[in-house]
Amino acid sequence: MQPRILVGEQQCDELLEWLDAHCVSLSMGAPLHLLRERWRRTEQDDQRLADLLAQLIQEQWVELAPGLTPPHLRLSPDGYRRLLSATRFSTSAPPAIDTEAAPVAEPDIRPTVFIGRGLTLSEIALRNQVLSIFRDLKLKKGELLIGVTVSRYWQETGLRAGDLRTAFDVLLRDEYLRHRIRGMDVYWELGEGGAEFIRGPLTPARLLECAPEITQPGPHVPDSELRDLISGAFEGPQRFSGSRIGYSAMKSRWHGTGLDDNALLHALDLAYKAGIVRFHGADEHFDIELTESGVGRMPEQRSVLSKLSHKLGWGR
């Protein structure tokens, strides 16, 4: 795919792409002296750069970030809106230059926050926090997002860089994201599981509130198996539409799988997004209700779970 057409003047477009890819944060932009250094490597004079920047400022693509020393240049709110509407590249057509940037958020739109207001730094919260960036930007399977944009979003949440690395560990294990290198830049590609995750409804707040603090990511279990384990918990006389299991009872049974509470909450989240279960109540005292759609799943999955269900005593 060809580079995005923004202003329509190639050098202006290249400056906007560079600025988008190298902003320190959404509100700060990038130091003007770094842009000047990059420009001088093209062996063009500073007056040409000044003329291009004057044009971009006049057309309200960029603006100086207020109150910063040394001066910083950032995309204006209207510039971000126009940038978002430009064509994005996909993995089938890598960018021709390493300054090609994926879309970024507008400065007046703050990221959805899944970690905060006293919530624990948990696996389910980290997973949602990063994937919310891809949801907010309406990215689809196979589309790339430059790493600096993810970092800028993360800074807006006030979370530590080390927490972002832990989140990537979780998402790579889940196979929701893939790591890509283009030129000198790092990109993140949305995998099939990640795309399916963000297509579903938002994770219920009660699951976030019940989540334990993450120590290190547990083993990988395919999403389909996690959903099946939740469906399998309703085997036997409990298996009818509207039947319920309390979260505490589900948690006790779950420990027989050898998987931790993070895996249970992820499984419940996946089952909820797939329409297999719904929740009633608040805090840790909520009930898990099997839906009509959930009842219909079990006959097809019975052979997969029969040994494990028998071992756990589910359905007895």
Image (cartoon, rainbow, N blue to C red):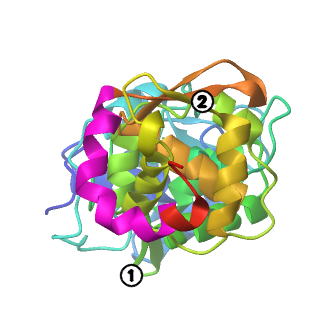
Q: Which mark sits nearer the N-terminus, 1 or 2?
A: 2
**Residue density around tag 1, few if under 14, some if 14–19, many if 20 or more, within 10 Å:** few
Residue at horizontal 79%, vertical 50%? 212
Closer to the camera, 311 or 101? 311
Going by the numbered disc 2, the residue's amino acid type is Arg
Question: Left or right of 75: which side holds 6?
Answer: left
Magenta-highlighted residues: 292-309
Q: Position of residue 77 (x, y in %)?
A: 47, 27
Residue 18 in view here: yes
Residue 136 in view here: no
Residue at horizontal 80%, vertical 36%? 119
> Disc 1 and disc 2: Cα gap in Å?
29 Å
Residue that carries the numbered disc 1 in the rendered image: 183
Q: Residue furthest right?
A: 118
Which is closer to the viewer, label 1 or label 2?
Answer: 2
The quarter of the picture where the N terminus appears is bottom left
- Relative to 126, residue 178 above or below: below
Q: Return the mark for residue 110.
A: 2
Residue at horizontal 71%, vertical 31%? 66
Q: In which image quadrant can residue 83 be found?
A: top left
Q: How many marks?
A: 2
- Relative to 43, residue 108 above or below: above
Q: Position of residue 203 (x, y in %)?
A: 54, 35
Under tag 2, what secondary structure?
Answer: loop
Question: Left or right of 122: which side holds 204?
Answer: left
Going by the numbered disc 1, the residue's amino acid type is Gly
Q: Position of residue 63 (x, y in %)?
A: 54, 34
Closer to the camera, 149 or 284? 284
